[in-house]
Amino acid sequence: EPEVTQTPSHQVTQMGQEVILRCVPISNHLYFYWYRQILGQKVEFLVSFYNNEISEKSEIFDDQFSVERPDGSNFTLKIRSTKLEDSAMYFCASLTGRTGAKNIQYFGAGTRLSVL
Amino acid sequence: RKEVEQDPGPFNVPEGATVAFNCTYSNSASQSFFWYRQDCRKEPKLLMSVYSSGNEDGRFTAQLNRASQYISLLIRDSKLSDSATYLCVVNMDSSYKLIFGSGTRLLVRP
């Protein structure tokens, strides 16, 4: 069964450093997402990406965050200058978005980001 | 008011029990509804979509009441492996972004 893959599974970084979280969505899916989940809290939407541009972003997704789909397969989330409060699980998801298909999002296993 | 509200639990039930979870959502424009399951420190996994007519998948039954903005999940004959957090999830716009509830924790004991 096709799956969304994320790397690394765990990233440890120092406050102020840049991190890039990587995702390979399911091939032929058209919509891509990043969500985050702070330990003990609910899953929160960060950003959606369609047709090579951001289609929607949340208040959390400020200027420190950016997304890119550099090569047609990878989908990356960059945090420019990490803060302690960025420590969380980051989930990538993709959705087919094709006419007539079920609008179900499939999630990757997540990257646990620890900012020290 | 929270966009998606769930009883956090935990629900602690014996194997074989029937357990029901409820959820309410605030935005009447919500379009699609789901129950996801999340195991500790794992990704959310789709359990089932929820339709207005109600739908069943084995031991799991989901109901949607659009007028009351209420969603439910019924689990019959609980198994130990059902122990997890159950997430009520809605989406409401053309980007298909998902809005999650905080989840209801289920513990099934032997």
Image: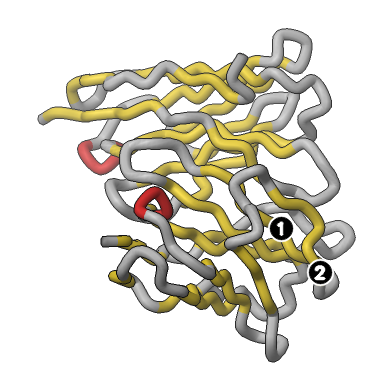
Residue B42's quadrant in the figure? Answer: bottom left
- The answer to whether tags 2 and 1 share a subunit is yes
The label shown at residue A53 is: 2
Quadrant location, the C terminus of chain B: top left
At horizontal 67% and vertical 56% (from top left) the residue drawn is A47
Measured as percent of width and height from the top left, residue B65 is found at 70, 15
Q: Residue furthest right?
A: A99
Measured as percent of width and height from the top left, residue B26 is found at 69, 18
Measured as percent of width and height from the top left, residue B13 is found at 22, 20
Q: Amino acid at mark 1?
A: Ser
Q: Residue furthest bottom?
A: A71
Quadrant location, the N terminus of chain B: top right
At horizontal 39% and vertical 26% (from top left) the residue drawn is B104
Classify A23 as above or below A36.
below
Measured as percent of width and height from the top left, residue B49 is found at 63, 40
Q: Name the residue beneath numbered marker 1.
A: A48
Query: Of residues B84 and A61, which is closer to you in this image?
Result: A61
Q: Kindly tell me whether residue B56 is visible in this rendering.
A: yes
Q: Residue furthest top?
A: B68
**Element type at mark 2:** strand
**Separation of residues labelled 2 and 1 (CA atoms):** 9 Å
Residue A96's quadrant in the figure? Answer: bottom right
Q: Amino acid at mark 2?
A: Glu
Proximity of marks 2 and 1: CB atoms separated by less than 8 Å = no
Query: Of residues B39 and B52, which is closer to you in this image?
Result: B39
Classify B32 as above or below A9.
above
Classify A19 as above or below B103.
below
